[in-house]
Image: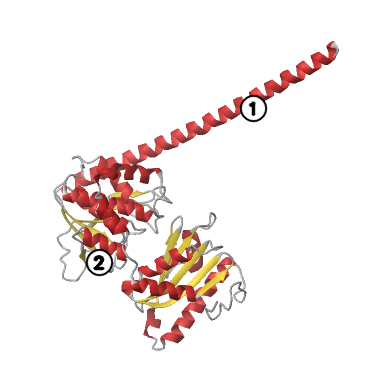
Amino acid sequence: MNSANKNLTSDALNKLVKAKDLDTVDKQVESATESNARKRSNSEARKAAESKTDEFYKALEMARGQSLLICIKGYPDPDNIASSLALEWLAQLYEMDTKIIYFDEISHHENRALVKKLDLELEQYTAEIDLTKYRYYAINDSQNIELPIQLPDPCELLFFVDHHKPLGTVEGHFIDIRENVGSTSSMYVEYIQNAPVVFRGDSSVETKIATALMHGIRSDTDDYVNATAADYKASQFLAPLVDKDLLSLISRQAISAKTMDLTQVALQHKDIRETYLFSGVGYVREEDRDGIGQCADYLLHREGIETVVAYGVVGNSFIDGSLRTKSHTLDPDKWLKDVFGKNEEGKWYGGGRKDKGGFQIPLGVFSKCSDRELLWILIKKTIDELFYKKIGIDSQSSRDGDLSTGKV
């Protein structure tokens, strides 16, 4: 090789090395930038959480010695039950007189087990309960502040804590809504960690609360599938404080016979359209309402299905439905709102979060229809056509048997 060729080869090699060095430097800079961005994001989230915790205790101090009514909206579930217990414990540290009430039946088998095994003091609302003594009220794990009862004046909203998209305007003394957290229970663990007394879990009351909070986190994050850093951090704090045997017992309750029957009906009447599965299960007793959501959970395991909607008529008073999805592009909250819209008062019929949602539509005057079979045919046809229109397919097309009759 002559001298000129050697110099040419050497120059080319030097340029290649420099190019690789520059590429490496670029990647290192990019990695460092991403790392710094994550650190800033985590720092900002931590500061926001600390700020909210400070506000929480300022609200408690303001209401010290007053009475607080803690309201569980909708069907009680592990997350709102646990959050209510945690709030009660914290409020009592500030000499507050508290009561936890719920309005709808505790229908899910795990929720009944939670209340029974932990011997929780929850009271279902009746007209005999005197509400005039309560100065403040609180709502956890709910998308709005509307209650099925009228609270007497001047009862004010003291706390509203939730991890869903809010439906409507929420006004109160303390509002903490974080959509980037998987459960309301995790938010209350943050408050507890900064309580004026140390939460050690060395009393029966604290053990019950820790166990309930852990179950609330596990339940609302779908066994940690949808957990966030805040949920893992809260679970780490709770882990040494819970009654593990009791937690295991609560989490392994047998599925009720009614829910099994409902699942069979859902399978028989499944309606598969592309990657969607719809199933109308007919009339459902109010105490079995949670079975609709469990049906949707089960049906989502079917191969090729990304989104499931199961629905039925509950208590002969409203259409109740549950949506479950593993699609990366479908937003349950927007999807259901697009399908069903709002009522005359501007309230959405449906809503949801990352992977699940639900809707309720009152039957109104149609609940008086004596021909239940005819009414169900009308309901199913209307609901299904709304779904078909949303996903943009012909209601007559199918890929899985004679879906017009529910036979597959």
* Image: 227 above or below 299: above
Give the image location of residue 24, x and y in percent: 61, 26
- Residue at the spot of label 1: 23
The quarter of the rendered structure image containing the C terminus is bottom right
Give the image location of residue 88, x and y in percent: 20, 52
Q: Residue furthest right?
A: 2
Q: Nearer the viewer, residue 209 or 321?
A: 209
Q: Nearer the viewer, mark 1 or mark 2?
A: 1
Label 2: few (<14), some (14–19) or many (≥20) C-alpha neighbours in 10 Å: few
Name the quadrant containing residue 232: top left
Give the image location of residue 143, x and y in percent: 37, 58
Helix, strand or loop under label 2: loop
Taking the image as drawn, is residue 217 in sight? yes
Q: Residue at x 26, y 64 (%)?
A: 112
* Total marks placed: 2
Q: Residue type at mark 1: give it.
A: Asp
Q: Nearer the viewer, residue 267 or 199?
A: 267
- Residue at the spot of label 2: 150
Name the quadrant containing residue 257: bottom left
Helix, strand or loop under label 1: helix
Q: Nearer the viewer, residue 48 or 172?
A: 48
Label 1: few (<14), some (14–19) or many (≥20) C-alpha neighbours in 10 Å: few
